[in-house]
Image (tube, rainbow, N blue to C red):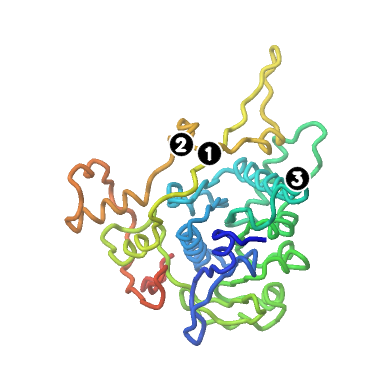
Amino acid sequence: MVETVDHRAWRQVRIPWGVDENGDILYWRPALEPHMVVTGTTGGGKTVLLDGIILEICANDWPCILIDGKGTEFLGFATWPNVQLVATETWEHVAVLHHIRRLVEERRQMVKRGHKQEADFSPLFLIIDEYADIRDEVTRWYTTVKGRGDPAKAPMLLMLASIARIARSFKIHIVLGLQRPDVEFLTGEMRDNMRARVAMGKLSPDGSKMMFDSYSAGVAVPQIAGRSTCMDGHNRIREAQVWWTPDPRRVAPDNASDVDILRGLLPQHSSHERLVIIPPRQKSTGEEVVQPTYQDYAHAALVPARERRDLEDHVVDYHRRLFLQADHLRGEHDPQDSAVLIEASTAHHAAEPDDSSPAAAASWPDDGML
């Protein structure tokens, strides 16, 4: 088999995200550790780590699809180059996971029929934050859209383990964010597929057992913003410090350090089109109006955003506005850009840059704000 440049890059790439206790840079290597799980309660740094992973993936010119369980954590990436979609609503979460499941099966069939080999596919990254909350919300929502003949449990809830098992062979990678270790995801085969694991903050002994097969790893981590415990692809457990990565939606334009981090990670161009999900419509049968069912949402089409501009009315270009504001403050702006300036977002304390890595490398804000 002739190895393509894209496949060679995928095999060799290392995504940096922090340093260990010896100051050595820690990496996620998707070709060797196909999926990643990050746990941490609110304020513990989980979202900061996920933000850094997202930006590094995009900087490598690979596409990301984001499933946002809170509905607001990933809004700052809605127009970031190579982020194809940010799903914020329950029905969108369902549509995206079904789409990924179909894509996995499509790639599998191509290989099975000899049309392609695994190396021919381009990588795709699915970032899911707060999946346990998504699971609970889908369970409630399903009772309102369950159609005649549908199973008792929402099919989406049975998909993640299957996707994780099969997708790894076809360059589809999952990064899963959880508030705390969950027995549904961190036992047996599912845990084995999540070979890259990071726990932000302290773990309980039971949580440590689920994450690292140890009752002691991570239970005495210092209460320092960004401090974590991780397992790498060689099953080595280490204490780690996650790099600070700012959220484009929340950075103040006068925070030069955070703005420079984002500029340094901004891809020069976007190689992957943004997508939108076409929402299913209600149907009329004579005098009766039938609302969309679960199956309608499950089969909702993902299409290029340029084909449905009407579905992007709510999208805010946070990072462009941030950069324009920052340039305005530095006196580097184009006067014609002044019309798009907006009020500053909530300020963060300035962070001092750290030259240990070109990406997402800065200390955490002094007050630990996330």
Q: Amino acid at mark 3?
A: Pro
Quarter of the image for residue 289 reads top right
Q: Quadrant of the N terminus?
A: bottom right
Q: Nearer the viewer, mark 2 or mark 3?
A: 2
Closer-to-camera residue (149/354): 354
Q: Position of residue 152 (x, y in %)?
A: 81, 42
Checking the image for residue 312, the label placed there is 2
- Which residue: 27% across, 51% down? 324
Disc on the earlier residue, 1 or 3 = 3
Q: Quadrant of the C terminus?
A: bottom left
Quarter of the image for residue 339 reads top left
Checking the image for residue 37, the label placed there is none
Crowding near the residue tagged with mark 2, few <14, some 14–19, many ≥20 C-alpha atoms within 10 Å: few
Closer-to-camera residue (150/123): 123
Q: Cα distance, mark 2 to mark 1?
A: 8 Å
Checking the image for residue 276, the label placed there is 1
Q: Are marks 2 and 1 in contact (CB under 8 Å)?
A: yes
Q: Amino acid at mark 2?
A: Glu
Q: Is residue 276 above or below residue 205?
A: above
Q: Position of residue 142 (x, y in %)?
A: 71, 40
Instruction: Give the secondary structure at mark 3.
Output: helix
Instruction: Give the secondary structure at mark 2.
Output: helix
Horizontally, residue 84 falls left or right of residue 337, namely: right
Closer-to-camera residue (31/54): 31
Outermost residue toward the front in this view: 2
Crowding near the residue tagged with mark 1, few <14, some 14–19, many ≥20 C-alpha atoms within 10 Å: many
Q: Which residue in the protein does label 3 denote? A: 155
Disc on the earlier residue, 2 or 3 = 3
Q: Amino acid at mark 1?
A: Val
Q: Position of residue 349 (x, y in %)?
A: 32, 67
Disc on the earlier residue, 2 or 1 = 1
